[in-house]
Amino acid sequence: MADKRNGFLEESAPSLDGVNARLSEAAQSGQPLDVILAVRGRISPVPGKHRGKWRMRTSQGHVLTFRPEFVVAFNGAAQAGQGISGPSMPTVT
C-alpha cells in the first residue's frame, strides 16, 4: 500500500517540481490557467468595501481571499442539526 502525504496517495500526488514547472510555463506564456486548490482552514466573510468575498485562514496562518463564484466544491462544515458528510456542490440561485 502506498504511503499518504498530505492526505494524498504518494503515487497520485503531483510532484512539487512538476507543479512548479507547469506554473512557471503558464506565467512565462501569459496564457490563462485554471488552478484548482484544496485549502483547509477557518472561513470568515471579508468586512468593509469587499463584502461578498470570503477569507480563509489556514492552521499555518496563511490567508486566502476569494469570491464565492470560484468555489466548485466544499467539505467539512455541518449545517445545524446535521452531521458532516462528503463533498458538496454549491447551489447557484
Image (cartoon, grey):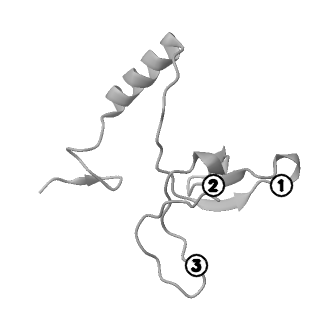
Q: Is residue 75 left or right of residue 7?
A: right
- Disc 2 designates what residue? 57
Residue highlighted by disc 3:
79
64 displayed left or right of 85? right
- Looking at the rendered image, the quarter that the N terminus falls into is bottom left
Instruction: Check the image and name the residue furthest to the left.
Output: 1
Q: Earlier in the sequence, mark 1 or mark 3?
A: 1
Q: Residue furthest top?
A: 29
Q: Tag 2: Cα neighbours inside 10 Å, few (<14), some, or many (≥20)?
A: some
In the depicted structure, whether residue 21 falls above or below residue 76: above
Task: Residue 47: give its label.
Answer: 1
Nearer to us: label 3 or label 2? 3
Q: Amino acid at mark 3?
A: Gln
Q: Earlier in the sequence, mark 3 or mark 2?
A: 2
- Is 38 or 20 nearer to us in this picture? 38
* SS at badge 2: strand
How far apart are the two marked residues, 1 and 3, measured between alpha carbons?
Answer: 23 Å
Residue drawn at the location 73% of the way across and 50% of the way down? 53
Is the C-beta separation of discs 3 and 2 under 8 Å?
no
Instruction: Provide the secondary structure element on which disc 1 rests.
Output: loop
Vertical arrangement, residue 19 with respect to residue 90, above or below? above
Q: Position of residue 82 (x, y in %)?
A: 52, 84
The kind of residue tagged 1 is Pro
